[in-house]
Image (cartoon, rainbow, N blue to C red):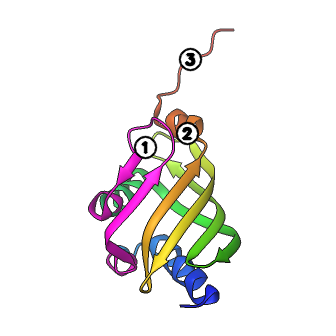
Amino acid sequence: MNLEENKQIVRNYFQRMNEKRFSQAVELLSDDLVWWIIGRTKVSGKNDKRTVQLGFKLLHRTFSDFHFILHDFTAEENRVSLTAESKGRHSNGKLYNNHYHFLFTIENGKIQSAKEYLDTEHAIWIEQPETESIT
């Protein structure tokens, strides 16, 4: 596949996720996918295809109007680099707006691997209950 086709696979994946077409999004993931997420959060580390699928479904259940906004794409060989952000309102009322760098590897028209870098402090904060401030 050429560079533009590889970038389009990534665009299609996020478009399907944003539209909650999960089964169609999963079709773009390799069966032996490895999706690595930075940090020490409960989703950090290496995740397989099934875990990724369940994780994104959970995001859409936990957040209202959760979506990704795609920014810059760069492609070289079989890799696609993407900067993006996400927005959504958590069920606890907090507004989630995180920023990402993804590095995808594409093989045979599917996402073979992903490395996901994000603000893990923000990801942890969104899950914490609001605390009363002392004045």
* Residue at the disc numbered 3: 132
| Dot 2 and dot 1 residues touching (CB under 8 Å) | yes
User: What percent of the width, then of the height, locates residue 49?
Assistant: 31, 64
Q: Position of residue 55 (x, y in %)?
A: 36, 55
Q: Residue furthest right?
A: 72
Q: CA distance from mark 3 to mark 2?
A: 23 Å
Q: Residue at image x 40%, y 77%?
A: 25
Residue 117, relative to residue 60: is it above or below? above
Give amino acid for label 1: Ser
In the foreground, 133 or 35: 35
Asked which quadrant contains residue 7, the reply is: bottom right
- 3D distance between C-alphas at marks 3 and 1: 29 Å
Query: Residue 83, position in %: x, y?
Result: 67, 62
Q: Position of residue 79 (x, y in %)?
A: 57, 73
Q: Are marks 3 and 1 in contact (CB under 8 Å)?
A: no
Label 1 SS = loop
Question: Which amino acid type is shown beneath numbered disc 2?
Answer: Thr
Q: Which residue is mark 2?
A: 120
Q: Residue at x 38, y 51 (%)?
A: 46
Looking at the image, is 97 positioned above or below residue 33?
above
Residue 26 is covered by the magenta coloring? yes
Q: Could you classify mark 3 by the number of other residues whose Cα lies within 10 Å: few (under 14), some (14-19), or many (20 or more)?
A: few
Residue tagged 1? 44
Q: Secondary structure at mark 3?
A: loop
Depicted 47 relative to depicted 6: above or below: above
Bounds of the magenta segment: 23-52
Q: Residue at x 59, y 90 (%)?
A: 2
Q: Is label 2 or label 1 in front?
A: 1
Residue 28 on the magenta span:
yes
